[in-house]
Amino acid sequence: MIRNFLKDESGSMSAGFGAVLLTLLLSGGVAIDVGRAHAYRLNMQQALDASTLHAAQNARENNYQQNAQDFFKDNFDKPRISEVKSQYALDADFIRGTASGNLSLFFGGFLGRTHLPISVSSAVSVGSSPACIVALGTRNGAGVTLNGGANVTSPECGIEVHTTKRPAFIINSGVNLDVPQTCIAGDRIVDNNRRVNNIQTSCPVNPDPYLGAFEEPDVSHCDYRNMNFNQANITLHPGVYCGHFNFNNSNAKVTFTGGQEPYILSGGSWNVNGGEWSGDNVSFYFADARSKLQFNSAVKATLTPPTSGPYKGVFITEAPGLRNSQFIFNDSRGFDFEGIVYLPSREVILNGGATIRSRELHLVSRSFIINSSNLHLKTPSAASAGSPLAYISQ
């Protein structure tokens, strides 16, 4: 009888322990489901932000909504979420996007719930352009460095610095900075000028406005390879330019024929020693870190980007994921450019009297150094040739 009693007591304790263990397992399972839901919601928000930006940049196209939905699907492919959908609507000066789906729960079924609805929203301002110059970030050094003699004038749009490195922004004495605002994500700068207003630190910055926005051309072949140009009149055509190209005649007139296809630089640089460049509907694409335009003494250039096609509004861009390198503008007789310059891997440097003047230009790079040079910008609002620039506002 005692043995039976003991057995009964043991059984009771086992049942109690089992109930506690089941409660702990369910609690842990619910925590796992909640954590997964949070991660999926974050991924959905990132995909929606990117697709809403895409919609805003193409808001004047009839099929902008379908293109944005396809863009969202390409960036958010989660097998455990069903009934995923995204929608976009133009509301005054905003594109508003929403996305939703149902997350399959691992442990929720024990509590009578097999799915958890997830939804996110995003709003992107259209036609406003708070920054003509955007420094996306840098591993070492400041995002923007303005040294003595630098003259940056941009009365309608400012500077945005994404890096939080210290210092994130350097402005030295003898600099003229005339912009409505300099928005810096970092909390520490070096200000040796003391005359510039509207510098804001710990400032919320917008995401990379062109991440994944441009298609990658075919660079598997070469149309031209390693050439020296010495003649006085040169006409170039879009294609793949492999290796190094030297423009040696300081009085040369170089004409670029336009089109929807870019001038692709692959495996080398163009070394430009003077001359005058001109062309409409012209776009350059850098296929690797070695590819660049090296503008040297007294170059004059007047170039505009394509008005249609995959590089609509794009003056210069590059392949994604390149290692860091430099892109240098030296002494010039004036660069009159329009469009988007998107070089997320490059440190853009203006030296020795280089002058860039533009009515419509949007400069986006890893970082900028401006030494004794002039940068005069008006607005990037039409830099994408009819498609408004877009910035996440909510």
Image (cartoon, rainbow, N blue to C red):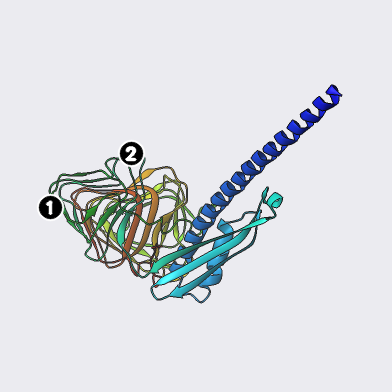
Residue 183: x and y in percent read 28, 54
Q: Residue at (41%, 59%) from the top-left corner?
A: 209
Instruction: Choose between 205 and 385: the one closer to the eye.
Output: 205
Residue 195 - label: 1
Of tags 2 and 1, the one toward the viewer is 1
As shown in the figure, which amino acid type bears the numbered disc 2? Asn
Residue 322 visible? The answer is yes
Q: How many marks?
A: 2
Q: Secondary structure at mark 1?
A: loop
Residue 179: x and y in percent read 21, 60
Residue 112 - label: none
As shown in the figure, which amino acid type bears the numbered disc 1? Arg
- Local packing at callout 2 (Cα closer than 10 Å; few below 14, some 14-19, many 20+) is few
Residue 140 - label: 2
Residue 161 horizontal side relative to residue 64, left or right: left
Quarter containing the N terminus: top right
- Local packing at callout 1 (Cα closer than 10 Å; few below 14, some 14-19, many 20+) is few
Residue 147 horizontal side relative to residue 46, left or right: left
Residue 311 visible? The answer is no
Q: Secondary structure at mark 2?
A: loop
Residue 29 horizontal side relative to residue 10, left or right: left
Instruction: Choose between 263 and 360: the one closer to the eye.
Output: 360
Question: Residue 5, relative to residue 276: is it above or below?
Answer: above
Task: Identify the image quadrant of residue 56.
Answer: bottom left
Upstream in the sequence, badge 2 or badge 1?
2
Residue 322: x and y in percent read 45, 46
Instruction: Choose between 210 and 117: the one closer to the eye.
Output: 117
Instruction: Choose between 326 and 176: the one closer to the eye.
Output: 176
Question: Residue 192, relative to residue 157: is it above or below?
Answer: above
Task: Identify the image quadrant of residue 13.
Answer: top right
Quarter containing the C terminus: bottom left
